[in-house]
Image (cartoon, rainbow, N blue to C red):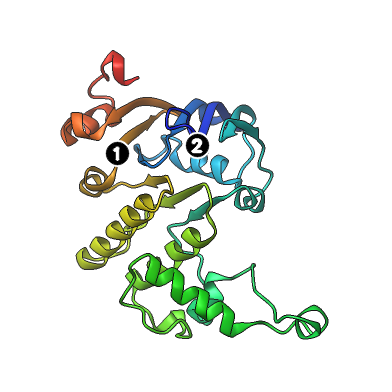
Amino acid sequence: MTSPDIPVLQARGLIKRYGNVIALAGTDLDLMPGEILAVIGDNGAGKSSLIKALSGALVPDDGTITLDGKRVSFGSPIDARDSGIETVYQSLAVAPSLDIASNLFLGRERRRKGILGSVFRILDRDAMRQEARRQLDGLGIMTIQNPGQAVETLSGGQRQAVAVARAAAFGSRVIIMDEPTAALGVRESRAVLDLILHVRDQGLPVILISHNMPHVFEVADRIHIQRLGRRKAILDRANVSMSDAVAIMTGAMEPQDGDR
């Protein structure tokens, strides 16, 4: 079990260059056990590159990433997933024509036992739907009643719930959420925020990337401010105002020494 004083996921000195453009200029990150860490920053601050490095979507030019205190190297998102890091992207990455259960097990399909599965490769749809129902119930997602329902028939918030349920089902160490409420209305955003809190309460630490400051201040435990490719500050949400966080993010104010 990870010590509460040791980060579950840690990055040190990550650097990523694209020609003359420096996306990451030696940035750090610390995700502690059982917390929601919000990552905020202006466009071009390096948030996307940081998250891609942590999720295996890009390989940094320099720096280190450790998971549970052990150094890791991700060459692809599959490597990160195999290590227990799941990412819910803003684009959702769901297959609309497939049903909910098939989306939850996309790339991890369960097959029938015996020769039907090993030779004929027949999927065990009943088992997948039963497990999908269990995952949805476990996360308190009560607006989806039928795991066999096509995703294309769901609302935006329900589709996001499916993506979060998939991450929670297979993310054994960390869940990263990239702008999960960006395209949602007030009511659906509320449901997704509750879902994020539920995931955290189940023991999974969450990295939340968001431009929505009220949402950040509602659910985050700490706030990582990314600026010009580096971590500018790390703030305790309970001890900072929203206006001060925005001022630090934009460069209008310098963080206190204890917040660096």
- What percent of the width, then of the height, locates residue 119? 83, 82
- What percent of the width, then of the height, locates residue 248? 26, 27
Give the quadrant of residue 207: top left
Q: Residue placed at 38% from the left, 71% from the top?
A: 137
Mark 2: give few (<14), some (14-19) or many (20+) Cα within 10 Å.
Answer: many
Q: Residue placed at 65% from the left, 74% from the top?
A: 110
Per the image, the residue denoted by label 2 is 8
Contact, mark 1 vs mark 2 (Cβ under 8 Å): no
Residue 50 visible in the picture: yes
Residue 160 sits above or below residue 38 on the image: below
Q: Is residue 134 or residue 186 the one in the foreground?
A: 134
Instruction: Identify the image quadrant of the C terminus.
Output: top left
Q: Distance between the residues labelled 1 and 2?
A: 15 Å
**The residue positioned farthest toward the front in the image shown:** 1
Amino acid type at circle 1 is: Asp
Q: Is mark 1 on a helix, strand or loop?
A: loop
Per the image, the residue denoted by label 1 is 221
Residue 36 sits above or below residue 259 on the image: below
Residue 18 sits above or below residue 99 on the image: above
Which mark is on residue 21?
Answer: none
Mark 1: give few (<14), some (14-19) or many (20+) Cα within 10 Å.
Answer: some
In the image: residue 182, left or right of residue 10: left
Residue 131 sits above or below residue 84 on the image: below
- What percent of the width, then of the height, locates residue 104? 53, 70
Residue 95 visible in the picture: no
Q: Residue placed at 56% from the left, 46% from the top?
A: 55
Q: Is mark 2 on a helix, strand or loop?
A: loop
Q: Residue placed at 27% from the left, 30% from the top?
A: 236
In the image: residue 59, left or right of residue 137: right
